[in-house]
Image: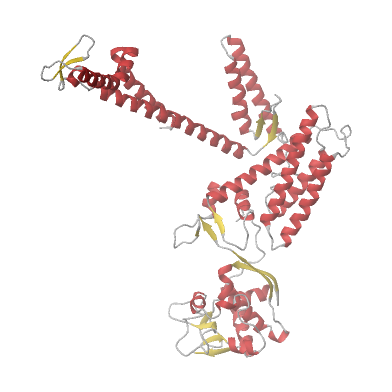
Amino acid sequence: MRRLGVRPCDAMPRVSEYIGEIVAYTEKIVAQGMAYEAGGSVYFDTAAFRARGHVYGKLNPWAVGSAALAAEGGGGGEAAAGEKRSAQDFALWKASKAGEPAWPSPWGQGRPGWHIECSAMASAIVGDSLDIHSGGHDLRFPHHTNELAQAEAYYHDCGCTQWVDYFLHTGHLNIEGLKMSKSLKNFVTIREALETFTARQLRLMFLLQPWDKSMMYGASAQHEMKAREALLRNFFSNVEVATRAQDLSASPTRFEAEEKALLAAVGACEAEVHAALCDNVNTRAAMDALSALVAAANRYLAAREASSNAGGPPAQAQLLRKAAAHVTRVLSVFGLVDGPADRPGLDGGGGAAASDDKFAGVMDCMAAFRDDVRAIARGGKGTMGDVMGACDSVRDVALVNLGIRLEDRASGKAVWKAEDPEVLRAEAEERDRQAREARAKKARGALERREAELAKLTKLAELPSVAEALSDRYSRFDPSGEPTHDAAGAELDDKGRKAARKALEKERKARAPLLRALEKDGEGALAAMAAEVEELRAELARALGA
C-alpha cells in the first residue's frame, strides 16, 4: 500500500482487543429491547427495531428478504431450529462451538457475531456517528445494513436514526471482463500489478473509471492510462521547454486572442473539476477536464511557436505556468504527483540538470560524444552515416539513462525535456520491439516468397522434357520441337497441328520460370536459391532474437 502511495489509516483495531466493548454493546441493545437471548446466543430483533420507529434495510431494501444474501453475511443458517424469532434476525453473540475461539459473556462462552464487531469498534473509536463509511457494494446487505441497525439500536436513547451520513460502496474489480476472485483464479496481487505498471499508472487506471461501478483491469484500461500519463508528461515537458530561458522582464506581456483563450480554458477547467468532484466524486470527468486544458495549452504553444518563428511574440511563461500549476494541483489531490503541489510537473518540477550528479552525467556524455566525433574525423575513413550514428547514440542511449528526452524539431533545432529514465527506457524497448517485429515480418515475408519459388522451381525441374511429356500423344517432331505426327505415326492435319501447338505452348509455359532462372543463374540456380533460403531463415532467426 505504501508503494501505491496510500496513506496509512489512523487506527486498525483487532476484534480480539475489543471483546469487552462488544459484550457491553450487545448488552445495551438487549436493554433497549431490540435483541434477545436464545440458547446462549443473542439475536437482533428486527421486528422490535421497526416497532421503535427505525427502518431496517434502508441501504438495499430489495435484498432484505433474500435468505441467500443473509446467509453469506452470517445472518441465516447459523441458528438452531426455533432459536430465532424471525428469519431476518441475525446474531450479535454466538454460543461457542467445539474448536472455536470463545470468550466469557453474560450468556456463557461465545464469540461476536459477524456484524457487531464493526459497530462496536467504530463507536468506541469514532463515536455516535460516522461521516463516511466505505466498502465494496456487495457489503450493502447484509453487513452494512446490520451495522446500521445495531448502531441505531445502541444509540436509540440518544435519538439516533442515522448512524452514517454517507456510504461509499465501490464496484468490483474485473480482470478482462470477469470479476476478480480467487475461485476463478484470475486475481492479481498489488505486487504483481506493480511489475507491469507504476503506482501512478495504477492510480490513473482507477481515476479514469467510476469508483462506484465495476472497474476494469486489462489491455483496454492499460492503453488509456498509459496514454493519459504520456499526455501529461508531454504537457509538462513542453511547458518547461517553452518557459525555460524566458526573461520575464524582457518578454511581451500583452494578451492577444490566444492568451485570452488559454486563460479562459484554465478558468473553465477549474470550474469543471470542481463540478465533477461535487458530482459523486467523478474523477473521470475531472481528468477529462484536465485533458481539455492540456489540449488548449498545446494549441496555444503551437500557435505561439509558429508566431515566434515568424518574428512574433513567444508563449507567455506566466500564463503557461498558471495552467501547469492548476493541473499539478489537481493531480496532487489525486495522489499522482511525487513532489510538492506548488512545483508543476509529475515529479515535483525538478529540472533535468538540477543536481550536481545529473550535471556531471551530462558533461560525461558530451565529452564521450566529442571523443567519438573526433575519432571519426581523425580516422579519415568516417562517413556522414558514422556521425549520424554517434548523434543517435547520444540521443537514444546516453541521454536516456540520464533522464533526458532529446527531440528533433522540423526547424532543425532540437529541444530537451526532463523525463523519468524508466519511462524513456520503456519507450526505447518498445521501439526496439516494434523494429524487431518489423524486421521479422519483412524477413518472414521474403523467406515465404523465396521458399514458395524454390518449391515451384524444384517441382518444375522434376518434370520430364517437353518432348517426353508429349510422347504419349505424338511420335515425331520438327526441328523447332513442334509435333508433326500423332502417336500412331500418322501425319497431323491442320486441325491436329493447331491442337499440337496449343499442347506444346502449355508445356513450355509451365517450364518457363525454370528456364528463366537457368538462363539468369546457370545450372546452379536451384542450389543458389536454396542457399538464399537458408540465409533468409538465419536472418529471420536473428530478427526474432533466436
The image quadrant that residue 34 belongs to is: bottom right
Which residue is situated farthest in the front direction here?
494
Q: Quadrant of the C terminus?
A: top left
| Residue 420 image position (x, y, % from top left) | 64, 39
Residue 3 visible to an observer of this rendering: no
| Residue 520 image position (x, y, % from top left) | 35, 13
Q: Residue at the location (50% across, 54% down)?
A: 176
Q: Does residue 275 appear left or right of residue 318 in this picture? A: left
Q: Compared with residue 68, is residue 532 higher up or lower down, i.e. above or below?
A: above
| Residue 275 image position (x, y, % from top left) | 75, 59
Q: Compared with residue 368, is residue 23 higher up or lower down, i.e. above or below?
A: below
Q: Does residue 32 appear left or right of residue 446 in this picture? A: right
Q: Residue at the location (76% across, 37% down)?
A: 301
Q: Nearer the viewer, residue 467 or 18?
A: 467
Q: Residue at the location (69% across, 52% down)?
A: 287
Q: Nearer the viewer, residue 65 or 12?
A: 65
Q: Residue at the location (29% across, 14% down)?
A: 524
